[in-house]
Amino acid sequence: MEYRSFGESGLQSSAIGFGCWEMSGLYGAFDNAEIVAAVHRAIDLGVTLFDTAPTYGFGQSEEILGQALGARRKDVVLVSKTAISWDPRSQTRKYDSRYTTVKTINEASLKRLGTDYLDLLLIHWPDADTPLAETMEALNDLVKEGKTRYVGVSNYTAFELEESRKTAPICANQVGYNLFDRRWERQMFPTALGLGIGIMAYGPMAHGLLTGTMRPGHQWDANDWRGRGTIFGQDLFGADTLPRNLAVVDQLGRIAERLDTSLPRLALAWVLCHPAVTVALSGCRRPSEIEEDVKALDVKLDAGVLSEIDGIMRGAAGQVEHLPSRHHEPNRVPALAAGATPR
């Protein structure tokens, strides 16, 4: 395993992190026993960072992760988020980065996770209605109270990073980053590097597109958010765009084969090539998946291969230059099916 630091903060983690969004139910059905086995296998393989959030399945992801970690909680860098509240009856979400809300949501997360503290707490999405200084004050106080060791943000722009860093020791910004989505790389990574803020890359396999398992006409589970076609403002899974993107994926697969590796490993290795990236979050539900993903650290991509990959990606469909309005993103996920139990 390779370990990287979040700037000069003192926080260090494995370069491959275990992402727990897949425990929310929004990526289809899963088996709890397999999840628990995957968590333990990840720790055995040297994975130290586990990332979750209260809104992943309305607390379900945190509960499962807390149970899975058990006594091994002390061996990991535990990351969760705050600042999105929800109504369990209507299942609607809203940004809320007010001082009291940030602390209240974090306290509920600690209970679900079965721990007294987090290693890293992130503001999940910026809230346009709350002054950044108020939100950062809440993070500072949570550090003083021993509720979290380090603090960071998620989905913050370059400007928001600069402003937040003025009042809180932000050491991480978690954003979506993969071969099909390089918008943050162009618009925020240079600022993060300059400030010594580490990037946590979520969705490195383009939310399943880069796994090599999808085929034209792919059928989605009823609660799978990808069924809408649009992923963070990009129409990657639409009826017209998915076939074209799968053709791109096939070409990337041939590069992986030539390098004697797999497509998922290639996708993760590409993300980890960027000097701003501290950790790539691998969404896993089975031991075999994390076993596969950690091997990405053995994949070396030279300048020639990176240039070839860039050329292939010019054939991708549905990409856009600008990020969508952040203040609508949490409600892009579909509601649970009628009669389903809120998670």
Image (tube, helix red, strand yellow):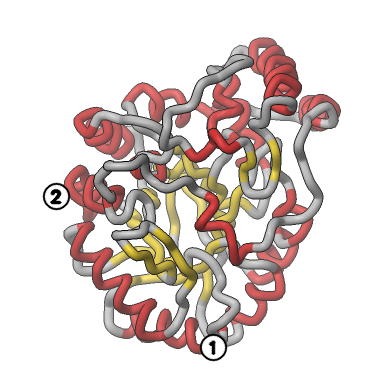
Q: Is residue 113 visible?
A: yes
Question: Which residue appears farthest toward the front when viewing the image?
Answer: 338
Which element carries disc 2, helix, strand or loop?
helix
Residue lying at 33% horizontally and 56% vertically, measured from the top left: 78
Q: Position of residue 327 (x, y in %)?
A: 60, 66
Label 1 near label 2: C-beta < 8 Å? no
Q: Residues within 10 Å of mark 1 (few under 14, many from 20)?
A: some
Task: Kindly identify which residue carries mark 2.
Answer: 71
Q: Position of residue 10 (x, y in %)?
A: 45, 66
Question: Which residue appears farthest toward the left when viewing the image?
Answer: 71
Q: Nearer the viewer, residue 164 or 72?
A: 164
Q: Is residue 252 visible?
A: no
- Amino acid on which the number 1 mark rests in the picture: Ala
Q: Is residue 303 above or below residue 114?
A: above
Residue lying at 25% horizontally and 72% vertically, measured from the top left: 107
Task: Kindly identify which residue carries mark 1.
Answer: 133
Q: Nearer the viewer, mark 2 or mark 1?
A: 1
- Amino acid on which the number 2 mark rests in the picture: Ala
Q: Nearer the viewer, residue 123 or 199?
A: 123
